Image (cartoon, rainbow, N blue to C red):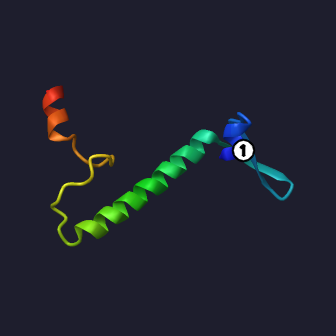
Amino acid sequence: MALMTHQHIRHLPVIDGRRLVGMISIGDFVRHLIDEQQFAIDQLENYVRGPRHDLPTCALTRRSPLPQTLATQLA
């Protein structure tokens, strides 16, 4: 991803031996990183929460409701 960012490359070929099997974009990398980070966040939240699954999730995760103050401002 660093190569793609520094060289302003948006797509890279995926090669198996000498055969082109596809293309990968920087967006594909970003989506993969976000998914990995979300998985790590979920695992850490479950570890910290323990058996109490009724506690709210972190406000920064995609599964959490809006914080109460923001929800009242948007209502």
Give the residue drawn at x 27%, y 52%.
Answer: 58
Give the residue drawn at x 58%, y 44%.
Answer: 28
Inspect the image, locate mark 1, and give the three-letter code of the amino acid beneath it. Leu
Q: Residue furthest right?
A: 18
Callout 1 crowding tier (Cα within 10 Å): few <14, some 14–19, many ≥20: few
Left or right: 31 in relation to 2: left
Tell me where residue 73 appears, x and y as whole percent: 16, 27
Give the residue drawn at x 41%, y 54%.
Answer: 38
Tell me where residue 69 appears, x and y as whole percent: 15, 36
The quadrant in which residue 27 appears is: top right
Give the residue drawn at x 41%, y 59%.
Answer: 39
Helix, strand, or loop for circle 1?
A: helix
In the image, residue 17 sits, relative to residue 48, either above or below, namely above
In the image, residue 39 sits, relative to residue 33, either above or below, namely below
Tell me where residue 5 appears, x and y as whole percent: 66, 39
In the image, residue 42 sits, relative to residue 25, either above or below, namely below
Left or right: 72 in relation to 49: left
Say which residue label 1 marks: 3
Tell me where residue 60 appears, x and y as whole percent: 32, 46
Q: Quadrant of the C terminus?
A: top left
Looking at this view, is 14 or 5 the one in front? Answer: 5
Left or right: 42 in relation to 12: left
Total tally of numbered discs in the picture: 1
Q: Residue furthest bottom?
A: 51
Looking at this view, is 75 or 58 the one in front? Answer: 58
